[in-house]
Image (spheres, rainbow, N blue to C red):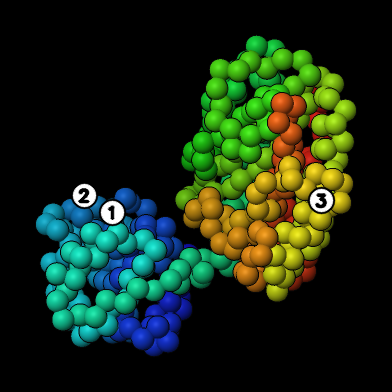
C-alpha cells in the first residue's frame, strides 16, 4: 500500500490546521500511515520530516514493516526521543489527536515538550480512511468472502439443543477455516426471544423448533474487518416474524438504493427507516442504519438520523436495518456496501432471503 502518499496527503493539512507537525498515537491511524501492525507505536509527521517511534520489542518488526521512515525503537520512555526529533525538525506547534489522548497523557506531554504549543486536532486520519483504495477494497472483499463461506458452513451446526455460545464458537472456527486471520468482533448469536436484543451476548440458551436465529459476525483479514447479519428460521417462524423479515429486507434495499457518492448520511438512513415506520414498526428500529468498516469495525461515515456526514465514492459502509419485538424475537439484515460512481452494491454474495432450516 502507498503509505507515503497517505502521509503526504495528511501533511498537506498541517498548514490549514496551523501546526508544524502531527503526533499520531491511535494505532489504526499509525498502521494506515506506515504499515506497522504492532501494539505500541506513534508517528511524528510534518513537512520537515517524519519519524516512526516504537518500543524495543518491535525494533526488528518495524524494520520490515516500516522500511521507508526514520525509525526509533527505544527501551526507554519514548517522550525523550520524541522531544529530540521535535527539536531537530523545528516543530514549535504540534498537533495531537485530541479524541485519543487522556488528560494524564497530555499533562506528561506538556511537561516533556515545554516550549512547544500542543494543539488538539479532530479525526483527520479517520476521515482520510473513509475512502478505500483498490488494495483495501480487495482485502475487504477477501474478508467478506470468508464471512459468506462461514455463514454457509454454520447452517449445518444449527440443530436442536445447540447453545448460542456453541454456535458462536463454531462461527469463529468457520471464519478461520475459510481463510480469515480471526474474527472482526465477538459474534452475536441470538435464538428466539433473544433476537429482540440488538446486541445480545450469546449464552447457554438452546435452540428449539420455531426459533429465529440472528447471527451478526465478520472476518478479519490483514487488519481489515467486515460485518454481516443474517436472521434465519429454525422450522416455521411466527407469522409476524416472517412479515418483519420481508419488511427489513425491503428497508435494507431502500437504503442501498439511496446510497451514492454525495448522499447525506441522514437521507440514506431516512430512506430505509421510512419503510419500517410506514409499516408501523418505527419504534422497533432502535439504532442507526450503518457505519463504515475498514481497519476498525466501526468507523466513519455514520449513517443515522440527523447524521451530517456526506458519503464519498470508495467508502464501504454497512446497511443494517432491524426490527426487534420483545418476547417474540427480531430480525436484522446487514451487508457491507461499496459506494461507487457506477452503482453501489454489497461486497458479499450471501442470500438475503429468509432461510428455513
The Cα–Cα distance between marks 2 and 1, rounded to whole angstroms, is 9 Å
Is the residue marked by circle 2 packed among few (<14), some (14-19), or many (20+) residues within 10 Å? some
- What residue is at 39 percent from the left and 80 percent from the top? 11
Of the numbered discs in the image, which one, if any, rests on residue 277?
Answer: 3
Residue 260 location (% of width, % of height) = 74, 68
User: In the image shown, does 209 or 228 lie closer to the viewer?
Assistant: 209
| Secondary element at image label 1 | loop
User: In the image shown, does 230 or 201 lie closer to the viewer?
Assistant: 201
| Image side of residue 187 versus residue 212, left or right | left
Closer to viewer: mark 3 or mark 1: 3
- What residue is at 83 percent from the left and 38 percent from the top? 244
Residue 325 location (% of width, % of height) = 74, 34
- What residue is at 76 percent from the left and 15 percent from the top? 209
- What residue is at 49 percent from the left and 55 percent from the top? 295
Is the residue marked by circle 1 packed among few (<14), some (14-19), or many (20+) residues within 10 Å? some
Cβ–Cβ under 8 Å for marks 3 and 1: no
Q: Earlier in the sequence, mark 2 or mark 1?
A: 1
Residue position marked by numbered label 1 in the rendering: 40
- Residue 121 found in image quarter: bottom left
The Cα–Cα distance between marks 3 and 1, rounded to whole angstroms, is 46 Å
Q: Is residue 170 visible?
A: no
Closer to viewer: mark 2 or mark 1: 1
| Image side of residue 292 versus residue 252, left or right | left
Q: Which of marks 2 and 3 is nearer the N terminus?
A: 2
Where does the C terminus fall, quadrant-wise? top right
| Secondary element at image label 2 | helix
Residue 175 location (% of width, % of height) = 57, 35
Cβ–Cβ under 8 Å for marks 2 and 1: yes
Q: Is residue 299 visible?
A: yes
Residue position marked by numbered label 2 in the rendering: 57
Is the residue marked by circle 3 packed among few (<14), some (14-19), or many (20+) residues within 10 Å? some
| Secondary element at image label 3 | helix
Amino acid at each position: 500500500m502507498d503509505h507515503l502518499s497517505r502521509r503526504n496527503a495528511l501533511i498537506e493539512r498541517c498548514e490549514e490546521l496551523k501546526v508544524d507537525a502531527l503526533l499520531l498515537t491511535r494505532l489504526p491511524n499509525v498502521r494506515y500511515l506506515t504499515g506497522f501492525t504492532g501494539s505500541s507505536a506513534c508517528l511524528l509527521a510534518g513537512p520537515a520530516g517524519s519519524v516512526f517511534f516504537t518500543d524495543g520489542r518491535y525494533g526488528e518488526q518495524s524494520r520490515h514493516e516500516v522500511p521507508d521512515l526514520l525509525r526509533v525503537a527505544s527501551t526507554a520512555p519514548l517522550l525523550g526521543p520524541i522531544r529530540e526529533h521535535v527539536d531537530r525538525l523545528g516543530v514549535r506547534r504540534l498537533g495531537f489527536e485530541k479524541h485519543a489522548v487522556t488528560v494524564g497523557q497530555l499533562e506528561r506531554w506538556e511537561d516533556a515538550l515545554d516550549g512547544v504549543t500542543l494543539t488538539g486536532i479532530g479525526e483527520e486520519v479517520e476521515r482520510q480512511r473513509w475512502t478505500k483504495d483498490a488494495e483495501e477494497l480487495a482485502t475487504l472483499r477477501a474478508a467478506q468472502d470468508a464471512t459468506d463461506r462461514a455463514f454457509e458452513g454454520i447452517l449445518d451446526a444449527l440443530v436442536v439443543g445447540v447453545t448460542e455460545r456453541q454456535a458462536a464458537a463454531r462461527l469463529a472456527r468457520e471464519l478461520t477455516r475459510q481463510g480469515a486471520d480471526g474474527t472482526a468482533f465477538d459474534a452475536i448469536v441470538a435464538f428466539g426471544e433473544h433476537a429482540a436484543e440488538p446486541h445480545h451476548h450469546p449464552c447457554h440458551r438452546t435452540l428449539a423448533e420455531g426459533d429465529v436465529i440472528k447471527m451478526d459476525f465478520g472476518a478479519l483479514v490483514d487488519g481489515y474487518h467486515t460485518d454481516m447479519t443474517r436472521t434465519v428460521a429454525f422450522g416455521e417462524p411466527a407469522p409476524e416474524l416472517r412479515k418483519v423479515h420481508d419488511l427489513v429486507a425491503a428497508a435494507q434495499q431502500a437504503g442501498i438504493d439511496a446510497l451514492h457518492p454525495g448522499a447525506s448520511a441522514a437521507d440514506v438512513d431516512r430512506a430505509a427507516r421510512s419503510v419500517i415506520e410506514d409499516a408501523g414498526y418505527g419504534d422497533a428500529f432502535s439504532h442507526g442504519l450503518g457505519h463504515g468498516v475498514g481497519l476498525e469495525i466501526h468507523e466513519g461515515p455514520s449513517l443515522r438520523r440527523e447524521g451530517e456526514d456526506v458519503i464519498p465514492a470508495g467508502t464501504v459502509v454497512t446497511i443494517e436495518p432491524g426490527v426487534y419485538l420483545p418476547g417474540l424475537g427480531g430480525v436484522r439484515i446487514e451487508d457491507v456496501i461499496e459506494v461507487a460512481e457506477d452503482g453501489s452494491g454489497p461486497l458479499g454474495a450471501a442470500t438475503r432471503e429468509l432461510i428455513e432450516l
